Structure formats: structure tokens, C-alpha cells
Amino acid sequence: MIQALETNGLLQILLLTLMAGMAMPLGAAIASVERIRPRWLETEVRHSVIAFGGGALLAAVALVLVPEGTSNLPVAAIVACFAAGGITFMLLDRWLAANGTPASQLVAMLSDFVPEALALGATFSISSEGGVLLACIIALQNVPEGFNSYRELAQATGYRRLQVIGGFSAMALLGPVAGAVGYFLLSDSPQVVSGIMLFAAGGILYIIFQDIAPQASLKRHWAPPLGALAGFLLGVIGEAVLSG
């Protein structure tokens, strides 16, 4: 009976994390066919989507990664994990720039998705309803992040549309892998999960202010900052629903 319950719980985790991950290629597919006219409106929509994704990432840091990460660690460990994440992502950003491979949106998307999938797997046995809601929130975040990542890669590389979407589909499999790892290996190690989440939070915060926020800026237009507010509001709503 217990084994059957564990198998059922694992299957739900795999399906939920895969669903959340497939929102990444969905966002990429939308970006690949999106054509808006006139040109000025297309530009404003793209900048607004970038800002929305940045707001959603900031919400993930402020409402999920940092609160969960700081709940099980002493101050010294909190500082070490958070700072290590920021410094590591700075070095990665410099390496990508030196090699002519802009991928800040992609790195931010995966840095958000993988730790949250780990946390989903680790905590699913406590609240399956919360796991379903968390998966839905992750999916909603991944759509604009997939959209932005596709635009970034399409403009900076020679990859074809199906290559990028196929790559994002393969990356979606990281969700079930992370969820299974969290379920089997980290459910009794909340400190490790907290450290991973803080590391990701530091890295995402670096990317938001180094790459995403500057890309979202558009002179004499007000939709992009409103997009950032909407993205953060999405996280607020999700946090409010999860906390009951």
C-alpha cells in the first residue's frame, strides 16, 4: 500500500514538472510565430514581455526562493549561498559574453525552473494540492521566459526555429529529473534544498539587473514597466494562493 502511494506520488511529480517545463517550448513557439504590426507596437510588446518575465523572476526570488531558502539555514550559510550564486552567475555571464553567446534569459529561466522543481519534489508528500498550484505557477512563469529566451537566441545565433523549440523541449525534461531527485534524495535534507534555492536566488537577481532589466527599458513608453508589475503580481497571487 505504501509503495503504491509512493509510486502514485512520484508519477504526479513527474507529470507536474513536465507540464511546467513544457511551458518553455510553448513560449518559444509563440515567439517564433508572433508578428505584430505596426512595428512600434511589436517593439513595445516584446519589451513588455521581457519585463513581465523579469517581474516573474523577481517574484520567484522574493516570494519563493529567498523565504524558503532562509527558513532552514543560519545567517552565515545564507550569506555564503546567496553570494556564491551571484558570483558564479557573474563569471558565467562573463564567459558567455567572451564567447559571443548571449544567453542570459535562458540561464535565468533554467535557474528558476530547476530549483523550484527540486523543491516541488521535496515537499510534495506534505501537500499535494500545494504541489499542483506550484507547478501551475512555474508553468505560467515559464511561458514568457521561454518567449524571451527564444528571441534572445534567435537574434544572437544561427539556430533554426525547430532547433530552438526542440532544445527547449529537451530542457523541459530537467523538471522531472529535478522533481525525482527532490522526492527521493532531498525530502529529508531541507538544508540542502534551501542552499540550492538561495544559490539560484543570488544568480537570478544578478541576471535581472545585469541583463534583463536593461533589455526591457524603452524610452517614452510605459507598457514595459507595467509588464514588470504584472509579472511580479503573478508571483504575489501564486504565493497568496499557496499560503491559503
Image: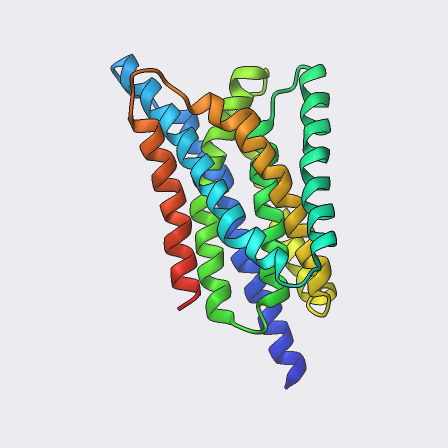
Vertical arrangement, residue 244 with respect to residue 18, above or below: below
| In the image: residue 47, left or right of residue 169 | left
Q: Quadrant of the N terminus?
A: bottom right
- How was this image coloured? rainbow
Q: Is residue 49 left or right of residue 163?
A: left
**Whole-percent x and y of residue 81?**
71, 47
User: Is residue 11 shown above or below 235?
Assistant: below
Q: Quadrant of residue 112?
A: top right
Report the residue that reaches farthest toward the front: 75
Image quadrant of residue 218? top left
**Depicted 206 relative to depicted 176: above or below:** above
Please state the horizontal and vertical placement of residue 117, each as a whole percent of the image: 59, 54
Q: Residue at x 71, y 59 (%)?
A: 74
Between 181 and 83, the one lying in front of the other is 83
Residue depicted at 68% across the width and 29% down the height: 90
Quarter of the C terminus within the rendering = bottom left
**Which of the two residues, 211 or 137, is positioned nearer the viewer here?**
211
Residue at image point 73% right, 40% down? 84
Residue shown at 69%/64% (left/top)?
Answer: 190
- How far from the left and from the top, in percent, is residue 101? 65, 19
Can residue 164 be spotted in the picture? no
Asked if residue 97 lies left or right of residue 37, the reply is: right
